[in-house]
Amino acid sequence: MQLEAGQVAVVTGAGSGIGRALVERFAAAGLRIVLADVDETAAREVAATLDVDTLVRRVDVSKEQEVVDLAAATVEHFGGVQVVCNNAGVAARTDPWTGPIEAWHWVMGVNFWGVVHGIRAFLPHLVLGGGGHIVNTASIAGLFPGFSAPYDASKHSVVAISEALYLELSGAGLPIGVSVLCPGWVNTRILEADRNWPAEAGALPDQSPAYEVTGRYLAAAVAEGLTPAAAADHVVRGVEAGGFWVIPQDDFFQIAIDRWARISDKLDPVAPEHVPGMPPRSQMMEEILALLLGPGEAAEAGPTDDG
Ligand SMILES: NC(=O)c1ccc[n+]([C@@H]2O[C@H](COP(=O)([O-])OP(=O)(O)OC[C@H]3O[C@@H](n4cnc5c(N)ncnc54)[C@H](O)[C@@H]3O)[C@@H](O)[C@H]2O)c1
């Protein structure tokens, strides 16, 4: 669908990163914007920089009623909605298997339930309004695992949900497009996601011991990543072309293709040695072992050239 001045776009996670860039891109095209974020101050700061009509709402997308209320407020304020970006997302730093279960609930609550809530709340309004477009932010972690189990699980879910929705809507002949955004590294505050760790989930858990090593490299990869504005440009091209897959960085594809080649041969999974933006996996594993066991022990425990 063509973006046109006067249309209404809703963006969750609008206060930072990709969400903020989407808002700015839509505003540049003259759309009116609903900015939803659990961090209301950040969303208000973004709205204050725009020349278009805005509605700002504090919304925790993991809570169904808050998203239902957001949809009602959107229609009440603007009379309808054409573009819905279910973008808010978080990543936990704690160990998925030994850390508190609340970290799973948090990641799935925002990344998975947030998308389900957004689709369910806004789809009836898109249908009644005669059409529109839904953009769900997944990740390259939705196409192969290896980042962290809760994040991988949530993002695989977003890809599956989006694909199912695309097939259902296009099968029914409804004029509602669906795109799934699967970026690699983007230069945002995603690694500081626990700034929004919910108070009701208890104390912020400790980061996993390995994160001391991986966190440094992740920070460098994110800092060197795509700009949020470039990611938003890819989204707009996807919406306007009606394309389902919005995958800004092609250099991650080979990992997904190699994984599927092994799946089709029924071979057990292997971790890729090279992930774009990261050092070789064997180097990181040596550093993690050295950190956890001490350098001498790590040399004995680690992989050797002759296996
Ligand atoms: N940055 C990357 O490298 C990268 C890569 C792939 C996918 N993504 C995805 O992009 C999306 C946007 O993240 P980002 O990278 O811009 O990070 P970011 O931390 O800069 O922005 C995320 C925004 O979501 C908001 N948010 C957090 N919890 C929320 C909740 N419960 N309800 C509503 N809003 C909430 C935050 O306040 C923040 O404004 C996420 O879904 C993330 O998983 C990011």
Image (cartoon, grey):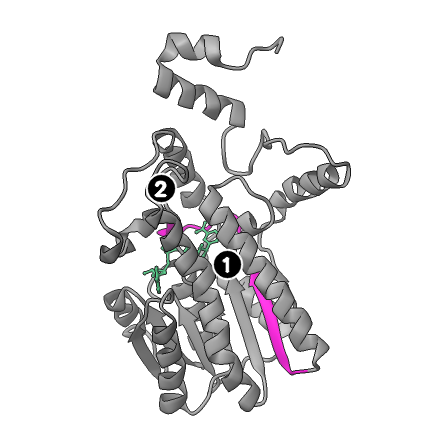
Residue sitting at 60 percent across and 44 percent down? 252
Within 8 Å of ligand 1, the CB of disc 1?
no
Q: Which residue sits at x=68%, y=70%? A: 167
Three-letter amino acid code at disc 2? Answer: Arg
Q: How crowded is mark 1: few (under 14 residues within 10 Å), some or many (20 or more)?
A: some
Question: Going by the image, does 121 lie left or right of 65?
Answer: right
Quadrant housing the N terminus: bottom right
Reading the image, the residue beneath label 1 is 230
Which mark's residue is nearer the viewer, 1 or 2? 2
Q: Is residue 122 left or right of residue 265?
A: left
Establish if 200 lies above or below 28: above
Tag 1: amino acid: Ala
Q: In this picture, is 274 found above or below 159?
A: above
Please provide the residue range marked out in magenta.
174-190
Rendering coords of residue 68 (x, y %): 39, 78
Identify whether 14 is placed above or below 94. below
In the foreground, 4 or 210: 210
Check whether the beta carbons of the residues at disc 1 and disc 2 lie within 8 A of each other: no
Q: Name the residue under label 2.
A: 93
Q: In which quarter of the image is the C terminus?
A: top right
| Residue 181 painted magenta | yes
How many circles with numbers are drawn on the protein? 2
Using the numbered discs, state the Cα–Cα distance from disc 1 to disc 2 in whole angstroms. 26 Å
